[in-house]
Amino acid sequence: MLSYVIYVPLLPFTAWVCYHYAGEEAVYEYIFALLGVNILCDVGFVLFPIASQLFFDPAQYSVALNGGPFTAMAEWIRANQHFPGGSMPSPHNAAGTVMLLTLWRRHRGWSLVFLPLLVSILPSTVYGRFHYISDGLIGIVLGIVMVRIAAALREAPSAAIPASRIPASRTPESRISESRVRVLPSLRIKSWRMS
């Protein structure tokens, strides 16, 4: 159950790795991918209100899992944070995939350190009776798709037009002050203030 619980502190740690080794834009790309998979998972909960094993057959799974402190934490999460119909797709597997692929792109050493934990999220979610294997596999696919979308959006050319290329007929030079052009590097968008 360690991999199911370690997922929580790995979320900000992955953001730190992005910032430390690849800069602020890498953090935005990572956060975009995480937000994307969480939104897609929430949409999946609405479209496919599938109950996990625990809610589908509670009599069969009435006994809590035995184990150490991580199992106790996972049982607390199940008792206090889970709800029927929140199984398909697995947000843990989706976010774990986003973290693994992001770490792989930004710092291979850290990705290899956390590879066993992140890869074992799928079996731990099934063993812990949080998800079916299909939920986990769909979560992994969503994670891969969102990482690719986030990377493609980051690499896409900016739609902003440099002030020097704006035709004079559209924006008279008296109205645009070059000293007042502000660049937002995280979004690669230039905004022009009119005087």
Image: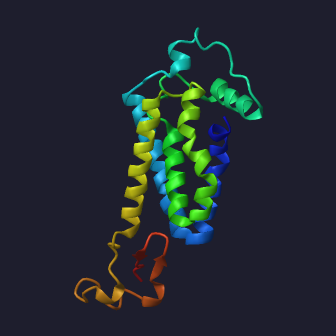
Residue at 33% across / 73% down in the picture?
Answer: 157
Q: Residue at 66% across / 44% down in the picture?
A: 6
Residue 168, image quadrant: bottom left
What x and y, as percent, mark residue 139? 45, 40
Report x, y in % for residue 112. Answer: 59, 57
Q: Give the vertical position of 127 relative to 170 (above or below).
A: above
Q: Is residue 50 left or right of residue 69?
A: left
Give the tally of numbered discs. 0
Do we see residue 88 in this rendering?
no
Q: Position of residue 29 (x, y in %)?
A: 48, 61
The quadrant where residue 152 appears: bottom left
The quarter of the picture where the C terminus appears is bottom left
Q: Is residue 191 above or below residue 32?
A: below
Residue at point 38%, 27% (across, down): 48
Name the residue located 35 percent from the left edge and 73 percent from the top edge.
158
Residue 74 showing in the rendered view: yes
Q: Residue furthest right?
A: 69
134 over 35 or under it: above or below: above
The picture places residue 27, in percent across and down from the top left corner, at 54, 63
